[in-house]
Every structure is written in structure tokens, then in C-alpha cells.
């Protein structure tokens, strides 16, 4: 069989090709050259033609190493079709909310912006267990990345092949199948500015020739460490930029801010003070910000004035603020050890078997700002600063000098809001242990010459989170605060007393287990594929049939202490404790490959799944390739998909979270739901939000469509364009706040009120909401040639999102197009992303220069801009685009030794500025869903083969 120019040019495309390369090198030197049949992600039929009906992106190990990529998370950040959601560790570095809760230490895969729970992750073509804390998505940190041979990314829905979750696409991490010899490697990625360094070592050993000896055994052990990158390590991590619309929304500062209280709770400033300047009521005062005082900045690092205009809170005109978002770790420290071993046996010429064990241990430490101490239910009058405190008279005198002694209640305790620096930053340490043990047989069935594969696997992901520093037992903390031993009014250079520090240490809750969970999966699957022995005009009719039996289990435990002493602000999750729950899945599937003509192939596939508790679902898929002329291929597909609710979405208990923003108003009296001090009925409210599961949730459904072409007009040039659409219905999510506001009439019951009619809570438990509609275009182009006795290649790969629309109810129309608009929590739908790679290989040397581009978008509006009360002088509603350049140099001329040196972010580009509200998202003036905060870094990879 002679391969035409289209196939040859695509097969040589390499990095980020839109069509998969054969696993083994194909050398079409003659018409009768034998081409090995291969199976690729998205099809169970082995074929000799390597151009695919569906777009498939392939990353080889050499591609990954050349880019200095050391983890699956880094790969996804550079993958253009990956969504921009809170799927990496930096996006979950601070105080998280809503569906991110409990997401400690998880990095997820999110294709086409459909979410980590709608993207299927496979390891060597089979499922692995989801993360133990949530049971929703696979943790990419558990993938044995150093052992990979390649990564295949199917950019299309695949529920007809794999079942649930495969809506956004499929990522298949493929490791080595056998290995003989010994190899050791070491890698480092060191930042120029300091902090956030990455180190990895790997050892690979193998013995036995599968063809000569009939067996092969190999194993690889890897260790990786990501060092901490603090928010204070980077200048761009700074929320004190009020002229641009960003200032920290907190009055809890290292030098405390004095607060008012109600008439029933006597305190130094009573129910508030009257500003002698203009009669304005003042409820929060930091003496450092009073007229003539030293200024908020004198209170310590990361302190500054509270911007009352930006937050529409003139009563806090003399308050100070603290840059709490910058106190969070940008890169969480992580240590991981992973191991993979495979024993393969050649039973005879037709049959083989193998045992495979994959195991990993991942430790991640999340850290964010110290606890804020505020007067209220937890910290009542008995805990306020007493008149016997060393700084009492200092505070009294400063207030009296400006407001007048007649407004003060000397001798009464001081109610204050304070950032407890002496308590230390809060830390949550999470350890995750994962494994998958698999036994499989594969080969050819004699007589009919059909391929078969069958496997039995058991996979587990078990996680546990414990409190690090910064957390204290509530009763003991209340006692030490009320004693006056701890002074909340200290300036830089001053220290807490030894007695105060000792009392805090005695109250520490370090080491207390928050919660733990385990996700388990047992799978038995079998597939046969082959030809029917008769030909259509274009070739032999082929098919595949299979069965997939799975049991999924999940358990989650909370606070298991015999004595559950309260710990202040500790994020226990006892309401969501689940004894082991499980469900069984039974599925059968079929696939047919019909080469109708030499120029037209059609593939038909379908899968029937039966789920405990949900009944059954059938999902078909049809795809085609048409080659009207040599060098040009048209391809398209249509399929349906589904995603079942996770155990958490079904069975979570009710939890409450205080809404901390200042931008929410009661939609019953303020139709927009946007708070404004100048509009009647639009006063700011801060109700409790209620989250939890619902057992009556139904599976999500989806339709996927795609059509595109691949063209190879010349031997050294090919390009492809693919249009796609994903429409999801009955999407499962926490009831969106904007939907509850915009459709208040339908959701009045979700706004829970007290006897006076005031909103005290919002019911945001999971619902089957209306749906989403996403459309986009993916482009890939490759040009190659020769220069100075070497070979060069230019590749451009891009993703264009044309539209992203949502609707809160099925009966409602879709929203306006949200592409280029800021979206909290979920996928940030930027319009365009691309990578441009130029490589040059000459002899033992190879060079790679890469450009990564991420489009800009419209920023989140500050509170004052939303309600129209104030627009900062330098406010810019547009977040600028983000472009970085990387370079690598490899040399393989030494015996058994090779090295790769690289520079990431050559021009040391900072992430673009954004004014998004940090109460709801990580990143102090930058967006971790888009940008890399590490800055310029230098990488070195050494490989040594010693056997």
C-alpha cells in the first residue's frame, strides 16, 4: 500500500499535530511496505491508515522534555484546547468557595472549558480513580509523568466509546510498555527572581527481551519537589492599586482597626462616631489613618488605606486595609513520589499477558493569610481588648484628639478587627496516596484473526487533610484575647509578650485531621476487533465489540476526634460525611468502520450504559473522512454524551458559607441585585449561602458536533481547521447566584427570610440547571524545510472560542455571548490561544523556540463601578493579553548522556493586571487561570543510560 502525500506529511508533523502519528515509525518506501496496525485514543479498531476521523493531538516525550514540562498540570496550562478554570494548584491557593471547597491539592484536566469532571482522563487507555477528597475528577498530580512515552488528547466527545465524563474530550497518558536497560535523569527549573523552583529525579530499570526471552520486567521510580512561591515574592502580586480599581476588601489589619457595636454591647466607640469634619457616621477607625497620623503604611508590611470609595463604604473612611490576597502562596509546596512497574509475558505467538502497578504519594501544603479576629458571635465583649491592656490609652487618646472625648466611653473594652499575625498563616496539609493494579491479556484469536484485549483493574485514591499552623482552639483563643496578654495594636519592631505567645502556642490545633476520603474503582473490560472478511468498495469492513463492568465506591469522613473541641475557622466538612457509597455500571459498546469508497470512510459507534439509580442511557456517534483529492481530507462527527452526578453532588449534606462581598442586594427590592448606598432598596446584604447535594439530580446530557479539513498542498506544508460545538443540558452545578437574581420570581423560595422579611440565607444546593452552548475553531499548521545541513520546522496551533452561552433554566433563552467576559470560579472563556513553535535540528543539536499567547478579556467590575458611585481614575475594563517566549537547546552527542537546557519566559513577562475581587478568586492582581507567576526561569535536564 502506497501512502499518499497527505498521510506522509501529517505523519511527519510531530509536536501538536492534529492527526496521530503511528507508535512505530512508518517508512513508506514501497507499494508493498508493511504498515503496522495501531489503536489510538477514540477508537477500538486497529487500522493501518493513520489519518483519523477525529482531531487528535499527540505529545511525545521528546516534545514534553523540550518544553521543560514536568507535570500534567504544566502540560494542560500550555495546551490550547484546555479550559481556563480553577483546575491548577495556584487557582486554589487561597480561601476557596463554592465547588472548589475541599479541593486541596488537586490539579484537574479541563478540555474545551467543559470542566474537570466532564473531561475523561485515562492511563494506558483505561480509567483511574478520581481524587479521594471529592470523587469528581482525576488528580493529575498522581499521573506518573516521568514514565510517559506520549500523551494523546482526543479533542471530541467520546461517551459512545468510554461512557460518562467524556464530554469535553479524552486525555490518555501512555507510559512505556516494555524497557530493557537502565536510565537515570535529573531535572531542575530554577527561577531568576527566587522561589518556586522545581526539581525532579527519575530512575528506570528493565530486563528481559519480550521476543527472545518471552518476558520483560521494568520499573521506574520518580521523585519531584515544587518549592514554595509566596505571594510577597512577586511585585505584581499587590492589591493596593486603587486607581486601577483594586484594593483589599478587609479592615482586619496587623495593627487593629477599632469597630463599633450595637447599643447592647458597650464598647469604646459605642454605635459609632461622628466625623467633626462633615458629620459623616464612622463605624471603623484605625488610628494610623486619622488626620495627622503616620498613615496606614506605618502599621507594617502589606498595610495601606482602606478605599472607601471603591467599596462604597464611606463610614470606613478612616480604616486601614491589609493585602491579604498577596499573603497566599502562589505556588503550593508539593512533594510527590510515583512508581510504575510492568511485567509482560509472551504466552505464545498469538497471546500475551501483563501485570501493571502504578502508585503515587503526593503531599501538598496550602497556606493563606492569618485568621481575622472580628467582634461578633464568636468574639464577644469578653474577648475584646480590655482597659488594662498596654495600648488602651494610646488608642483612646488618638481617638479623643480627633473625635473628642465626649464621643468615647473610656473604660469600656475596645471592639476591633485584627489580622492575628501572632497566630501565623493558616496551613492545610493534604496527603494523597493512589494506586492502580491491573492484569490484562491481549492478542489475536486464531482462526478469525481478530484482536482482543481484556483487563481487570482495581484503583484507589485516598486523601487526608490536616491542619498545619495558624489554627487555634476557639475557647482557648477567646480566653487569651480577653486576658489582654495578646496586643492587637503593635507597630513594626514591637513584639508580643512571651506569656502571650506561650498562650497562643498552648491553644494551637496543629495536626488535627480535618477530613479524609477514598475513591475506589474496580473495572473488568474486554474488547475484540477485526475484519469481517469481505470488502466494501473502499476496503474491508471492520468492527469492534466490547463490554465494560465497573463498580465505583466513595467514602468521606470528617472530624473523627473523640472530643470535637471547636477550632476557630477550621474548614471541617462534617455535614458531608459519607459512609461508603457505591454504584455498579454495566456497559456494552460497538464500533463499525465502513470504507465505503477509496475516498470515503464512515465510522459508527454506540454505547449502552446501565447505572444503579439512574436507569440506562444509549449514546451514538457517527464520524467520517472524505478525501476528494490527494492532499485534502474532510472530517466530521456527531455524537451524544452524558455525565452522571458524582457521589458528592447526590449525597452531600447541608453546609453554610457566609457571603463576604459588599456587592449583593436583595432582588425583591433591587431588581439588579447590585448593592448601592445611593439607591433605595439596594442596601448591601451578607446572607449565609447554603450548599449541599440532592438525591433527585439527573444525569447531564450533551450533543457534540464537529467538521473540519486537513490539507497538505506540498510535501513540507500541511494545515487543518476544525469547527466544533458542544451543547449541554441539565448541567449540574450549585444554583448560580446570578440566575437566582435574574429569575427571582421563579426562585423566591431560594431566598430565605426571617420574620421581618430580611434575607438571611440563599439556597444554592445543586440543581440541574438549563445548560451551556460552546462553539469554537481549532487550527494547526506545519511548515518544514532544510537549512545549513539541518532541518527546521514551524508549527502553529491555536484555539478560537466563538461563543459561550448559558441559561439558568431549560425554558429560558441562552444568555448573551460570554466569550471575553470575566467569569468567576469556572471556565474563563478567552477568545484566542495559540502556541508558535520553531525547531531546528542539526546533527546532535536541536533548538526549540516557542511563543505562548493568551488573549485578553473584560475585567470584573469593582463594586463602585458596578453601582455607578465611583470610577477610579486609571480604571481599564480590559485585561491585556499575555505572551511569553521559551527556548531550549538539546545535545545528544555524548555516549549514553544527553542534556537539554532551557529558558522559560525569556523576557520575564509579568502576568497582566486584573481587578477581580479576591474574596471570590485566587491571585492578587493577576489571574492564575491564565498566567504563570514564576517569571523567567532556567531549566536543565540530564539523562544518563548506564545499561
Image (tube, helix red, strand yellow):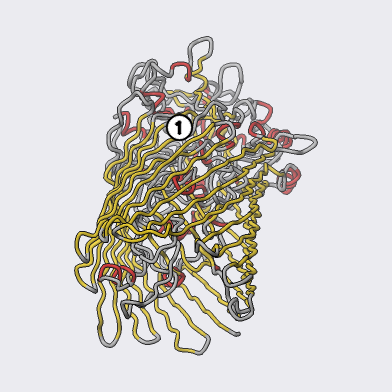
Is 399 positioned to the left or the right of 624 in the image? right
Quarter occupied by residue 335: bottom right
Quarter occupied by residue 51: bottom left
Check the image and report above or below for 47 versus 276.
Answer: below
- The residue lying furthest to the top in this view is 755
Which of 574 and 299 lies nearest the eye of the viewer? 574
In the rendered image, residue 475, in percent from the top left (x then y), is placed at: 73, 33
Which of 572 and 766 lies nearest the eye of the viewer? 766
Is 373 positioned to the left or the right of 232 in the image? right
In the rendered image, residue 209, in percent from the top left (x then y), is placed at: 60, 79
Q: Is residue 85 visible?
A: yes
Please tell me how many numbered marks the rendered image carries. 1
Asked which secondary structure carries label 1, the reply is: loop
The residue depicted at 43 percent of the width and 83 percent of the height is 891
Q: Where, quadrant-wise, is the N terminus in this rendering?
A: bottom left
Is 581 positioned to the left or the right of 672 in the image? right
Which of 898 and 691 lies nearest the eye of the viewer? 898
Q: Where, quadrant-wise, is the C terminus in this rendering?
A: bottom right
Residue pointed to by mark 1: 661
In the rendered image, residue 29, in percent from the top left (x then y), is placed at: 32, 80
Q: Is residue 243 visible?
A: no
The residue depicted at 61 percent of the width and 60 percent of the height is 440
Check the image and report above or below for 939 versus 504.
Answer: below
The residue depicted at 27 percent of the width and 61 percent of the height is 598
Check the image and report above or below for 506 versus 221.
Answer: above
In the rendered image, residue 849, in percent from the top left (x then y), is placed at: 33, 72
Amino acid at each position: 500500500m502506497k501512502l499518499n502525500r497527505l498521510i506522509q506529511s501529517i505523519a511527519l508533523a510531530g509536536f501538536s499535530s492534529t492527526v496521530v502519528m503511528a507508535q512505530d515509525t512508518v517508512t513508506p518506501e514501497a507499494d508493498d511496505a508493511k504498515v503496522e496496525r495501531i489503536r489510538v485514543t477514540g477508537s477500538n479498531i486497529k487500522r493501518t491508515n493513520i489519518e483519523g476521523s477525529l482531531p487528535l493531538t499527540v505529545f511525545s516525550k521528546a516534545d514534553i522534555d523540550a518544553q521543560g514540562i514536568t507535570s500534567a498540570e504544566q502540560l494542560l496550562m500550555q495546551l490550547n484546547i484546555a479550559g481556563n478554570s480553577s483546575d491548577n494548584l495556584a487557582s486554589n491557593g487561597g480561601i476557596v468557595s463554592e465547588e472548589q471547597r475541599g479541593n486541596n491539592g488537586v490539579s484537574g484536566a479541563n478540555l474545551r472549558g467543559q470542566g474537570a469532571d466532564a473531561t475523561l482522563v485515562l492511563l494506558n487507555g483505561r480509567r483511574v480513580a478520581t481524587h479521594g477528597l471529592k470523587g469528581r475528577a482525576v488528580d493529575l498530580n498522581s499521573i506518573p509523568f516521568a514514565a510517559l512515552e506520549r500523551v494523546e488528547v482526543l479533542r471530541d466527545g467520546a461517551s459512545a466509546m468510554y461512557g460518562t465524563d467524556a464530554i469535553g474530550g479524552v486525555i490518555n497518558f501512555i507510559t512505556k510498555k516494555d524497557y530493557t536497560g537502565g536510565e537515570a535523569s535529573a531535572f531542575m527549573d530554577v527561577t531568576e527572581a527566587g522561589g518556586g523552583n522545581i526539581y525532579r529525579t527519575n530512575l528506570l530499570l528493565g530486563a528481559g527481551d519480550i521476543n527472545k526471552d518471552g518476558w520483560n520486567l521494568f520499573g521506574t521510580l520518580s521523585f519531584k519537589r515544587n518549592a514554595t512561591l509566596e505571594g510577597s515574592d512577586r511585585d505584581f502580586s499587590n492589591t493596593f492599586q486603587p486607581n486601577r480599581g483594586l484594593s483589599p476588601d478587609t479592615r482586619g489589619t496587623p495593627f487593629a482597626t477599632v469597630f463599633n457595636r450595637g447599643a447592647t454591647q458597650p464598647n469604646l466607640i459605642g454605635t459609632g462616631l461622628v466625623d467633626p469634619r462633615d458629620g459623616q457616621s464612622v463605624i471603623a477607625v484605625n488610628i494610623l489613618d486619622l488626620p495627622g497620623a503616620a498613615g496606614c503604611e506605618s502599621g507594617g508590611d502589606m498595610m495601606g488605606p482602606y478605599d472607601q470609595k471603591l467599596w462604597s463604604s464611606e463610614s470606613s473612611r478612616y480604616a486601614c486595609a491589609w493585602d491579604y490576597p498577596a499573603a497566599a502562596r502562589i505556588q503550593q509546596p508539593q512533594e510527590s513520589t510515583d512508581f510504575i512497574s510492568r511485567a509482560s509475558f509472551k504466552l505464545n505467538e498469538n497471546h500475551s499477558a501483563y501485570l501493571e502497578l502504578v502508585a503515587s504519594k503526593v503531599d501538598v501544603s496550602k497556606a493563606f493569610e492569618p485568621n481575622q479576629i472580628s467582634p461578633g458571635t464568636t468574639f464577644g465583649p469578653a474577648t475584646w481588648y480590655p482597659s488594662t491592656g498596654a495600648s488602651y490609652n494610646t488608642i483612646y487618646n488618638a481617638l479623643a484628639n480627633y473625635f473628642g472625648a465626649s464621643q468615647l466611653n473610656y473604660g469600656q473594652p475596645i471592639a476591633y478587627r485584627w489580622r492575628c499575625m501572632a497566630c501565623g498563616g493558616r496551613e492545610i496539609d493534604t496527603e494523597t496516596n493512589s494506586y492502580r493494579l491491573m492484569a490484562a491479556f491481549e492478542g489475536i484469536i486464531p482462526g478469525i484473526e481478530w484482536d482482543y484485549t481484556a483487563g481487570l483493574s482495581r484503583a484507589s485514591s485516598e486523601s487526608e487533610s490536616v491542619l498545619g499552623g495558624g489554627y487555634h482552639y476557639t475557647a482557648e483563643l477567646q480566653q487569651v484575647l480577653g486576658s489582654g496578654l495578646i496586643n492587637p495594636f503593635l507597630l513594626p519592631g514591637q513584639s508580643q509578650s512571651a506569656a502571650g505567645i506561650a498562650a497562643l502556642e498552648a491553644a494551637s490545633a496543629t495536626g488535627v485531621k480535618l477530613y479524609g476520603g477514598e475513591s475506589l474503582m474496580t473495572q473488568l473490560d474486554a474488547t475484540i476487533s477485526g475484519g469481517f472478511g469481505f470488502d466494501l468498495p473502499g476496503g474491508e469492513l471492520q468492527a469492534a465489540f466490547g463490554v465494560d463492568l465497573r463498580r465505583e465506591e466513595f467514602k468521606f469522613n470528617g472530624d473523627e476526634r473523640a472530643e470535637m473541641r471547636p477550632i476557630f475557622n477550621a474548614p471541617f466538612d462534617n455535614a458531608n460525611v459519607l459512609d461508603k457509597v457505591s454504584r455498579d455500571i454495566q456497559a456494552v459498546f460497538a464500533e463499525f468502520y465502513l470504507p465505503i469508497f477509496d475516498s470515503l470512510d464512515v465510522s459508527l459507534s454506540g454505547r449502552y450504559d446501565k447505572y444503579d439509580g439512574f436507569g440506562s442511557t444509549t449514546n451514538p456517534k457517527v464520524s467520517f473522512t472524505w478525501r476528494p483529492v490527494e492532499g485534502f481530507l474532510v472530517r466530521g462527527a456527531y455524537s451524544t454524551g452524558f455525565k452522571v452526578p458524582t457521589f458528592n453532588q447526590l449525597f452531600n449534606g447541608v453546609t453554610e458559607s457566609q457571603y463576604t462581598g459588599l456587592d449583593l442586594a436583595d432582588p425583591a427590592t433591587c431588581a439588579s441585585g447590585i448593592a448601592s448606598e445611593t439607591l433605595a432598596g439596594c442596601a448591601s446584604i451578607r446572607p449565609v449561602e447554603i450548599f449541599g447535594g440532592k438525591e433527585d439530580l439527573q444525569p447531564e446530557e450533551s450533543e457534540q458536533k464537529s467538521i473540519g479539513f486537513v490539507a497538505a498542498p506540498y510535501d513540507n506544508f500541511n494545515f487543518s481547521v476544525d469547527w466544533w460545538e458542544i451543547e449541554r443540558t441539565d448541567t449540574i452545578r450549585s444554583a448560580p447566584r446570578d440566575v437566582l437574581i435574574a429569575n427571582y420570581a421563579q426562585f423566591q423560595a431560594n431566598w430565605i427570610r426571617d420574620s421581618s422579611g430580611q434575607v438571611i440565607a440563599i439556597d444554592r444546593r445543586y440543581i440541574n440547571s438549563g445548560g451551556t452552548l460552546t462553539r469554537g475553531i481549532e487550527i494547526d499548521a506545519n511548515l518544514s524545510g532544510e537549512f545549513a545541513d539541518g532541518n527546521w520546522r514551524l508549527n502553529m496551533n491555536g484555539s478560537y472560542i466563538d461563543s459561550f452561552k448559558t441559561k439558568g433554566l431549560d425554558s429560558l433563552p441562552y444568555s448573551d455571548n460570554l466569550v471575553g467576559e470575566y467569569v468567576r470560579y469556572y471556565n474563563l472563556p478567552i477568545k484566542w490561544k495559540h502556541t508558535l513553535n520553531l525547531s531546528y535540528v542539526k546533527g546532535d543539536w536541536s533548538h526549540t523556540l516557542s511563543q505562548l499567547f493568551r488573549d485578553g478579556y473584560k475585567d470584573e467590575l469593582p463594586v463602585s463601578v458596578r453601582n455607578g458611585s465611583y470610577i477610579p481614575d486609571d480604571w481599564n475594563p480590559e485585561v491585556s493579553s499575555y505572551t511569553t517566549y521559551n527556548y531550549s537547546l538539546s545535545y545528544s552527542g555524548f555516549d549514553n548522556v544527553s542534556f537539554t537546557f532551557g529558558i522559560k519566559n525569556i523576557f520575564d513577562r509579568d502576568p497582566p493586571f486584573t481587578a477581580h475581587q479576591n474574596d471570590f478568586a485566587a491571585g492578587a492582581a493577576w489571574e492564575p487561570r491564565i498566567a504563570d507567576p514564576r517569571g523567567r526561569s532556567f531549566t536543565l535536564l540530564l539523562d544518563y543510560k548506564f545499561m
